[in-house]
Amino acid sequence: MPFGSCERPPPAAPTPKYVFRSAAARPAFSTPPSFLPLYMSSPDPPRPTVEGNQALLFQYALWLFVGAISFSIAGMLLLRLVPSTMSFFGPMYTKLVKTPTWTFMTMLALLPLLMYGPILGRTRMILIAGWGCLIGGASELIGTTGWLTLGGVALPFGGYEYTQWLGPKLAGHVPYFIPPSWFAMAIISLDLARRVTARRWPALFLGTLFMVLWDVSLDPAMNEAFPFWTYDVEGFFFGMPLSNWGGWAVVTFVILVGYEYIAGDRPIQNEWAPWVYALNCIFPLSICLLRDVYLAALIGSVTTLVPFLLLWWANPDALKRSIALLRT
């Protein structure tokens, strides 16, 4: 504007009270993000998933499973080393036996649901569990009621009855824990068999064999060492009749054929299966040892090794992966 002009200059633009700058022009925080308040953190915390919850629940169930076994073994060992403690624990003896035993049986049924449920899916898992419980429970009812006999021998296992140690009974004959145990150990045995061979029928027969081998250690512990059940006749193998193993084989095979059909193309495999099988054999073997049934413990130890020796021979990598789980 020329000097001396009467015109007034245009008013200057007002200075804004607040200046908004682009993200690129803003200064970066000097505080590390890990120390920022929660409301300033950009990503939302991850929400728990179904798979994550199942994995966590499996860990808890496995620890309860191991804890129940350990508690029972410790109690039997204490009574053996210090018999006078029975005078103190006597009034609580029934609860001290039933509580870990019932916990063990509950976790045995729960563990396979958590192991194979994510692989098989909800529908298949329910059908498999239902099939195992149905066939196992029906066979036990037939056996304990004596409804079916052949040549004076009660089928399919021989004449027997359950005592009060396994709790309430279905129709007054079969404890409620027994049918789920058939489901659980059958699917574990099939898992181990499928690691040895990928062919369908050999895997079914091998899974049946693994179930019967488990009973070699189980039956003397639950019949001779501690009276969870009793037989009507004195059998050749620590009170067990030979018909028992024949019944185990037939019932297991029927269960496994159903599993194979229901699972379809879904794999029945979990790396924890060898550990669950081993723990379920260690428990009865320990009972035999602590109850002075040494020969049964020796024979049961040999038969327990058979699935693992076959697995080591046919698929050592699968066994190594299971062993590696303890390092994680």
Image (tube, rainbow, N blue to C red):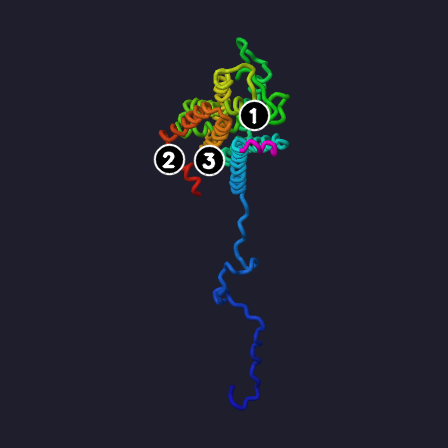
Q: Kindly identify the amino acid type of the residue bearing the numbered disc 2.
A: Asp
Q: Which residue is mark 1?
A: 179
Quarter where residue 15 is shown:
bottom right
The answer to whether 45 appears left or right of 209 in the picture is right
Residue occupying image coordinates x 43% and y 42%: 327
Asked if residue 157 can be seen in this view, the reply is yes
Q: Which residue is mark 2?
A: 317
Q: Can you tell which mark lies on residue 272? A: 3
The image shows a total of numbered marks equal to 3
Of the two numbered discs 3 and 1 on the same chain, state the one appearing first in sequence: 1
CA–CA distance in space, label 2 to label 1: 33 Å
Percent x, y for residue 294? 46, 25
Give 62 or 118, whichever is nearer the viewer: 62
Q: Residue furthest left?
A: 313
Label 3 SS: loop
Q: Kindly identify the amino acid type of the residue bearing the numbered disc 1.
A: Pro
Image quarter of the C terminus = top left
Give 269 or 261, whichever is nearer the viewer: 269
Q: Residues within 10 Å of mark 1 (few under 14, many from 20)?
A: many
Label 2 SS: helix
Label 1 SS: helix
Q: Can you tell which mark lies on residue 273? A: none
Q: Which residues are magenta?
A: 82-89
Q: Residue furthest front?
A: 84
- For the stretch drawn in magenta, the main secondary structure is helix
Percent x, y for residue 296? 46, 23
Give 119 or 108, whichever is nearer the viewer: 108
Q: Is residue 163 above or below residue 153?
A: below
